[in-house]
Image: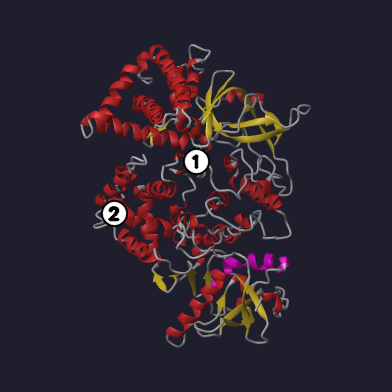
Amino acid sequence: MAVDALQEYVYPKLAKGCENGCQSIRLMKVMSRPQEPVRISLREVDLSRRPRYRCLSYTWGDPLDRSLSSSNDSLLMSSERDKYVKNEEDGSVIRVTENLLDALHQISRIQESKAEGQVSSWWIDAICIDQEDAEERSSQVSVMDIIYQRAVGVLIWLGKEDRRTPGAIKIMKSLARVSPDLTKMSRRFRSFNTDSSEIFDSLSRLCEDLGIEGVCPQDLLPYAMFLQRKWFTRMWVIQESFFSAATTVFCGEREIQWTTMQESSRVLAQTGMDTLLKAYVSNMEHYSLDVDTVKLPDNRLGNQLIFGSLQRANGETIGLGRLLYYSRSFEASDPRDKVFAILGLWRYTRNNRAGQMDIRPDYHKDVSEVYVEATTVAIHESGNLDILSLVDGTRREGTSRLPSWVPDYSQGSQLYSIIPFSPPHPSQLLLHASFKAPTDTQTRDLAVQGLEMDVVEDIGPTYSDIVNDFGLWSLLNLLLTYPQMHYPTGESPCGAFLRTLIKDTFRGSQAGIEGRLAFPTFVMQRIRETRQYIESLEDLEEHDIAEEVKAILQETERIIESLSSRYSEEKAIPTLREIEEMVYIEEEEEGSLAEQKLESDRKDIEESFRIAYFKRRLFRTAQGYFGIASQSIVPGDRVWVLAGARVPFVLKAADIEDESRWELVSEAYVHGVMHGNASRSSEEFLRRISL
C-alpha cells in the first residue's frame, strides 16, 4: 500500500526546556520481529533524567558508492522517504528511507538474538525528530552532542552486505594487524609510481613491504570500495563517532570492530596506500589513469583517519576553523549541516568559556547566513584570517550569494592549503600590525587592513593544461619572457621560478639544491609523454592531430634549449641532449642505479608539484614576483598582504568607483613574500578596505 493512502503520524509538540535544565527528546522501540513489517513505539523523555538508550548512525540514502557497480549489482537505492514504519499505538505511519528500514530490520534481529536485559530504546533522527518542523529540528540538532554523549552505545549501520563485503573485511583485518613499527617508516613508502601501467606493481610491493601475505592488488579493490560507502562521507558521523562511548558496526548482519576499522585506516594514511588505492580504483573505473583523481585532498579513502584525530582522549581545544576545514571532506544533503553538524563537538572541546561567541542551529536561516556566521565566529575565535585560505575561487550554484571572503563549505576540498591548517605563531604573520577580528555575525562585509603589494601581469597554464594537454611550453614561457635580470629578492629568476612551482617544498623540507636538480626529470617526462602520444596518433593514422602536437613539441623544445643555455650554471633546465640521455636510462637501463635515482627524483618532484600546483596556476607580477594561486585568477588582479594573515591573497576590485571595496579570489604563494618576511616599514602604507 502506498504511503499516501495511509494515515501519517502526527508528532505532538515536545515540551519546551524548563528552568531546571530539562530537555525533551523522543525515544523509540522496535516492537516487531525480523520477518515482520517494522512496528515501533515512540515516547517523550526528559534527557536530563538520563534515560538509557542507544543511537543509530547511518546514511539516509543509498549506502553504496555506485561508481564501480556492475549491471549485476542491486538497483540504486532512493534517498526519498518512500517507505514507512507503523506506530504501534494508533497504526499511523512514519515515512523512512529504504536504508533506514533495512537498519530497523537489523535492530530487530539483534534484539531477538541478544540476551534479556539489553537496552531496547533507540534515538534515530529521522524518526525521533519531526522532520517537517524547522523549529523542532533546530532545537533537537542543538543538543545532538548531548544525546550522543549520554547514549550507552552507538550502532553504525553501513548498509546491506554486498558481494564484496567478505573480502573487504578480510583485508581490513590484515591491515589492522600491521605492526606500528612498519607504519612509522611511512616516509620509506612515500614515493610511488602512479603511472597507469605500474600502479599494480607499486601496490604489490607495498603489500610485500608491510608483510601482508597472500594479498594482491585485486584483493584490495573490495576494501577500497567498502571505504567509499556513503557513511564514511556523511557529515554527521564526525560528531557521532566523537561522542560515542561504545560503538558497534554492522554491514548487513556482519559485525565489525570499530578499532579494526580505525587501525586499518591508520595504515592506509601512514603508508600512502590510500593514494595508491585511489589511483588504482580510478584506473579500474576509467581504464586509464586520470591525473585529476590522484593525490587529491578530498580522497575519501582517508576520511576515517579524521575520526581518530578528533578523539576525546586528545583533550585539546578544537577550533571552529579546523572543524570547518575537516567538514569539506564530508557530504551533507542539507548544506547548512556542514556547519550545524560540528557545533556540538566544537562547544564540547572549548568548554564554553564566558564571553565566547556562539552559534546555534537554525534551519530558518539560509545557507549564506549560516556560512557567514560560521566564518565570522571562526575568525574571531582564532584571531587571524587563516579560514580565508579555504576560499578557492569557485562557487556552487546554490551558494553563489556568498560574500567572496566566505568559503563555500558545501563543496569538497579542491586543493591543498598553502600552509598547514594549524594555529599560527605570531612570527608567522606577514604583517605585524594589530588585527581586529569582526564581532558582527550578520555582516556581509569584512573590514580588513593591508598592503596592496603588486598587480598580476601574466598568468601560466593550469595543472591539467600541463599534465594532460602538453602545456609545458606555456609554463616555461613565463620564465623565458621574464623581463628582469634578477628576481626582486636578488636570486636567480630560474631558482625563484622552480621554487614557486612547488611552493618551496621538496621531500617534506624547504626546497634546495635537491629540488632544483630533480626538476630536469619533470621536463623529461613531459617531453617523453608528448612523443609517445604522437607515436600513438600516427599508429592510428590521425596525421592532422599528430602534426598539431608535433608543432607544440617543437615549440617546447625551442623554449627548453633557450632556457638551458640562459641558466646553464643552475642545471635546472635540461638540454635536449640531457633529455635524450634520461629517456635512454628510463627505457634501456631499467633496474640500474642510475634508473632508480632518476625515477626517485621524478616521482618526488612530481609529487611536490601536484601538491602545490593542483587546481592552481602560476602568475608573474608587474614587479617581477612569481606566485601560484587559484586557476581563476586573471591579469589585473592584485596581490595583497593583510593584517592577521600568514599568506598573501589575490583580490580583485569590486567597484571601480570605490577603491575601498574588493573581492577575495584566493590565497597565494608568492616567492619572497612568505614566512613573515613582509617589511615592517611598509606598515605605514596600510589601507583599510572591505571585502
Mark 1 highlights which residue?
416
Is 99 contained in the magenta span? no
When the figure is inspected, residue 643 is found, relative to residue 484, above or below; the finding is: below
The residue carrying mark 2 is 216
Whether residue 596 is visible to the viewer of this picture, yes or no, is yes
Tell me what residue is drawn at x 61 percent, y 40 percent: 394
- Against 161, residue 589 (above or below) is above
Q: Position of residue 500 (x, y in %)?
A: 47, 27
Disc 1 from disc 2: Cα separation: 31 Å
Residue found at x 65% / y 72%: 129
What main secondary structure does the magenta stretch of the protein show?
A: helix
Q: Quadrant of the N terminus?
A: bottom right
Q: Which residue lies most toward the right here?
A: 657
The residue closer to the viewer here, 501 or 163, is: 163
Q: Amino acid at mark 2?
A: Cys
Name the N-terminal-most of marks 1 and 2. Answer: 2
Q: Check disc 1 and report its element: helix, strand or loop.
A: loop
Q: Amino acid at mark 1?
A: Tyr
Q: Secondary structure at mark 2?
A: loop
- State the image coordinates of residue 447 (x, y, percent, origin top left): 70, 38
Q: Position of residue 55 (x, y in %)?
A: 53, 73
Is residue 491 among the parts visible in the rendering?
A: no
Q: What is the crowding at mark 2: few (fewer than 14 residues within 10 Å), some, or many (at least 20)?
A: some
Identify the residue shown where x is 59% and y is 18%. Answer: 622
Residue 25 x %, y %:
64, 75
The answer to whether mark 1 and mark 2 are in CB contact below 8 A is: no
State which region is magenta: 134-151
Q: Which residue is rendered at x = 49% and y = 75% of the image?
A: 152
Kindly identify which numbered label has been placed on residue 606: none
Q: Residue furthest left?
A: 592
